[in-house]
């Protein structure tokens, strides 16, 4: 066979996409669709793995042009320092615009009150909703995935919020053939979930394939933790541990990252990407189900918060 014949056959051969290629293509399409339909989108960026992947996809969608979106982080004041450092490094590296809404500032002004259990994760809703309104964001990207939690599984990729940022499952719109309806009335906005169809394993495999850097707490490390409600929580100034809670130094890592007061670590010796992927592939509990105390407040805890404006 001549080289010209081989080239001709290669050109005529259909390209076979891997499942990661297909997921990436879908996410990039969604991000570009938002850029075309909306006037003032914003990306929620906490420095956690899902928001890091979402930002990576957005940068890829418009490269080599600069990212046309602002970033927004609702800082509870109890976030992990390692994650905040990664957030700031990423913003500086890519020359991005970051708007930070502070829960602590709302508490200091008397607009929010500390909860008896010390967790601030539910307190994010008011600063988030106020910032969306004040900055007139009409589309807000979130890193939520359907496999994380049953309330998130109900959401469409484009999820309409009313003028009070509230979510009504009955207003969900059909999304047949990847057609997304971004129409909204003045004062309303749309929450957009580009990686909604990804699983936790997909996220980790994509991180490995793309060589994406993550905060070190996603990998096994020794940390002082204490046991509360079946989860290893980080000792800190947020209100833990109590007098009857013993502090242990254990080899742990985090599967998901939120407020220190409600995000638990898991016992793990997975210190590399390959080890984390292998561990994730054999897990039978979702990351939020295993490590997020705020989702366990009631049977419908997440759905109740989403109706109020939480992501």
Image: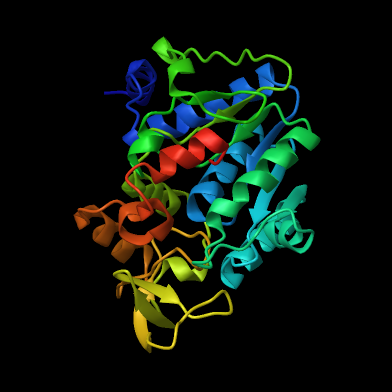
**Taking 166 as reference, is 116 above or below it?**
below
Residue 144 seen anywhere in this rendered image of the structure: no
Residue 297 seen anywhere in this rendered image of the structure: yes
Q: Residue at x 43, y 28 (%)?
A: 155
Return the x and y of residue 137 as percentages of the image width and height: 73, 31
Return the x and y of residue 207 as percentages of the image width and height: 44, 52
Q: Quadrant of residue 2?
A: top left
Return the x and y of residue 178 as percentages of the image width and height: 44, 15
Q: Residue at x 60, y 53 (%)?
A: 123
**Taking 4 as reference, is 222 above or below it?**
below
Return the x and y of residue 50 as percentages of the image width and height: 49, 48
The quarter in which the N terminus is drawn is top left
Q: Residue at x 67, y 18 (%)?
A: 36
Relative to 56, 109 lies left or right: right
**Taking 42 as reference, is 216 above or below it?**
below
Relative to 215, 102 lies left or right: right
């Amino acid at each position: 066979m001549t080289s010209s014949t081989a080239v001709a056959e290669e050109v005529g051969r259909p390209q076979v996409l891997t499942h990661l290629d297909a997921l990436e293509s879908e996410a990039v399409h969604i991000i570009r669709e938002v850029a075309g339909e909306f006037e003032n989108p914003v990306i929620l960026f906490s420095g956690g793995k899902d928001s890091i992947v979402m930002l990576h996809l957005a940068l890829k969608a418009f490269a080599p042009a600069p990212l046309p979106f602002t970033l927004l982080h609702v800082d509870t004041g109890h976030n992990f320092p390692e994650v905040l450092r990664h957030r700031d490094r990423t913003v500086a590296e890519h020359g991005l615009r970051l708007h930070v809404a502070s829960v602590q500032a709302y508490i200091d002004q008397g607009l929010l009150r500390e909860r008896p259990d010390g967790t601030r994760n539910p307190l994010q809703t008011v600063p988030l909703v106020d910032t969306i309104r004040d900055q007139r964001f009409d589309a807000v990207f979130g890193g939520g995935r359907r496999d994380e939690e049953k309330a998130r599984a109900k959401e469409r990729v484009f999820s309409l919020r009313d003028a009070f940022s509230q979510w009504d499952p009955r207003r969900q719109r059909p999304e047949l053939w990847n057609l997304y309806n971004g129409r909204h009335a003045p004062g309303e906005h749309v929450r957009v979930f580009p990686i909604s169809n990804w699983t936790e394993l997909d996220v980790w495999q994509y991180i490995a394939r793309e060589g994406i850097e993550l905060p070190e707490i996603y990998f096994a490390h020794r940390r002082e933790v204490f046991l509360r409600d079946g989860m290893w929580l980080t000792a800190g100034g947020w209100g833990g541990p109590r007098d009857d809670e013993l502090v242990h130094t254990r080899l742990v890592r985090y599967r998901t990252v939120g407020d220190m007061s409600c995000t638990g670590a898991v016992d793990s010796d997975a210190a590399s990407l390959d080890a984390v992927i292998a561990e994730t592939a054999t897990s039978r509990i979702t990351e939020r189900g295993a490590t997020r105390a705020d989702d366990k407040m009631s049977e419908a805890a997440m759905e109740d918060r989403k109706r109020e404006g939480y992501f």
